[in-house]
Amino acid sequence: MNRDTDRPLSVVILAAGEGSRMRSRLPKVLHPLAGRPLLGHVIDAARALAARRIVVVHGHGGDRVQAAFPDADLGWAEQAEQLGTGHAVAQALPLLGVDETVLILYGDVPLIAPETLERLLAACAGNHLALLTVELDDPAGYGRILRDTGGNVTGIVEEKDATPEQRAIREVNTGIMALPAGLLGLWLPRLGNDNAQGEYYLTDLIALAVEEGVAVQVGGPAAVEEVLGVNTRAQLARLERAFQRRQAEALMAAGVTLLDPDRFDVRGKLTAGRDVVIDVNVVIEGEVTLGEGVYVGPGCVLCDCRIGAGAEIRAHSVIESAAVGAGSRIGPFARLRPGAELAAGVHVGNFVEIKQSLVGEGSKINHLAYVGDSDIGRGVNIGAGTITCNYDGAHKHKTVIGDRVFVGSDTQLVAPVSVGDDATIGAGSTITRDVPPGGLTLSRAPQRTVSGWKRPAKKKT
C-alpha cells in the first residue's frame, strides 16, 4: 500500500507528561538517549515523513522543552491541565488543517522507525483509522485491544478499567495512530471521562470509529523496542542498549569489527571504512569519521573528529574536534583538543595534550608534553616534559617549530617564539628568544658540587 498523498500530513507529538517516576527536575522528554533528548528522536522520525507541520503538545516544564527545540518548523500547543491523551490532542487541533491526515506520536517513545510509520500511514489511506499494536509477553500497564469473533478491532480497554479476562490479552495499544483530521475534529468533543482515571482517553476513538462504520486498520512495528515508552530510568537504560545494539549491528554489517557490541556507544553519527576495529567501552559523540583499517583501543572517547586510514588510537585517549592523519599512532592516555590537526605518521604518546596546533608529518611527541597554539614541522621530536608556554594570563601566543627539530626533555618554549629548521634544544632549557636553524641551543645554570655537604637529619629524642 502507498500513503494517501492527496491529504497532507500533520504530526502531533504528545510531550506534556510530568514523568514523576523518573524522579527528576528535568522534563521527561528531555532525558537523553544516545546523547540526544527523547523528544529529539521522535521529531526526527516525524521529519523523515515530510510532514506539512509538526505540533508538540507540552505541559510540565514546557518552557524548557521549547527552549531545547527552537526550530522554526515546530508548532507548540500547551496542555495546562493533565486531563488525558484525548484532551492533549484537542489542544493541538486548532493548529491542524481539516484536509490533513493526522499522525499521533509520543515524545517518550524514541525508537519508532519512519518505515513503520509509513506503513501505518498507508493503512490510513481513504477514510480509515490506522492503529499500531504489538503483542507483549508482559502487557502490564498497556491498554488491551478488543476484537470480535471475526478478528475485527472493536475497541481498547485501559488496564485500570479492564476485567481479569481482558487483562489476559497480550495484544496492546501503542497509542500511535493515524486518521483523517476531519474525523478527529468530529470525535474529540464526544470523548467522555467516565473511567477509573477520570481522563479523556484517545483510545476511545476506536469505539467511535466502529460505531460509525469507519474501518480500523491495524499495523505492527518491525521490533517491539520501537513502541516501548520511557517512564522510569530503568526503562530508559533498556532503550539505550536497544538503540546501541541497532547501531552496532549496522556497523558490523558494513565491515566494522566490534570486540564487544554490548560495550560500545554511538551518541551521534559514525562513518567508518572497512576493517575498522573498535575495542570495548568506546564512546562516539558528534560526527566521527574513521578511515579504513583504523584501530580504536578500549576506553577511548572520540568526538567530532576525523581519523585517517591505518591510524591507531590506543587505550583511554580522548580526541575532540581534531584530525589525525593516516598511519598515526595516538596514546595511550593522550588528549587531542579542538583545533589539533596531525599529519600522516605522527606519534603522540601517553599523557600528551595538544590543542589548536598543526603537527607535521612524521613528528613525535611521545611523553608527558603539552603543545598549544603551535605550528610544528615535519620530522620533529618533542622530548618528555616539554611544554609550550602559550598563555601570559591575558592572551594566547604562538610557537613555530621548523622541520627536523629536536627538543630535549623538560624544555619550556615561552611564546611567542620560533625555532628554525634542524635546530637542537638541550634538555632542561627555557627558551624565551627565537632559535636559529641548526646548531645547539640551551639555557642552563652551571652544575656544581658542594664538597662536605651533609643532608639534614631529625634529632633523636
Image (cartoon, helix red, strand yellow):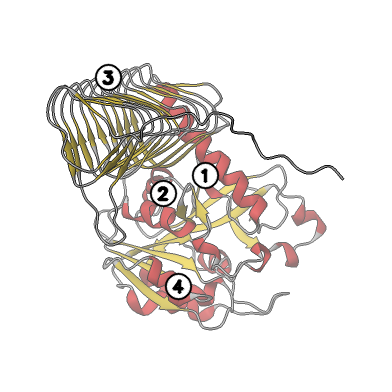
* 343 displayed left or right of 234: left
Q: Amino acid at mark 4?
A: Arg
Q: Nearer the viewer, residue 203 or 51?
A: 51
Q: Earlier in the sequence, mark 2 or mark 4?
A: 4
- Inspect this view and state whether residue 215 appears: no
Q: Earlier in the sequence, mark 4 or mark 3?
A: 4
* 138 displayed left or right of 49: right
Q: For mark 3, what is the residue?
A: 345
Compared to residue 3, the image places residue 188 above or below, namely below
Q: Earlier in the sequence, mark 2 or mark 1?
A: 2
- Where's the N terminus, which quadrant? top left
Which residue lies at the image location 23% right of the left edge and 46% below the top edge? 415
Q: Amino acid at mark 3?
A: Gly
Circle nearer the viewer, 3 or 2 = 3
Which circle marks residue 220 in the picture? 1
- Where's the C terminus, which quadrant? top right
Q: CA distance from mark 2 to mark 1?
A: 9 Å
Q: Earlier in the sequence, mark 3 or mark 2?
A: 2
Which circle marks residue 117 in the picture? 2
Q: CA distance from mark 3 to mark 2?
A: 48 Å
- Report the residue that reaches farthest toward the right: 461
- Report the residue that reaches farthest toward the bottom: 80
Q: Earlier in the sequence, mark 3 or mark 1?
A: 1
Q: Nearer the viewer, residue 284 or 399?
A: 399
Q: Residues within 10 Å of mark 2 (few under 14, many from 20)?
A: many
Q: Secondary structure at mark 4?
A: helix
Q: For mark 4, what is the residue?
A: 64
Q: Earlier in the sequence, mark 1 or mark 4?
A: 4
Q: Amino acid at mark 2?
A: Leu
Cβ atoms under marks 3 and 1 closer than 8 Å:
no
Q: Secondary structure at mark 1?
A: loop
Circle nearer the viewer, 4 or 3 = 3
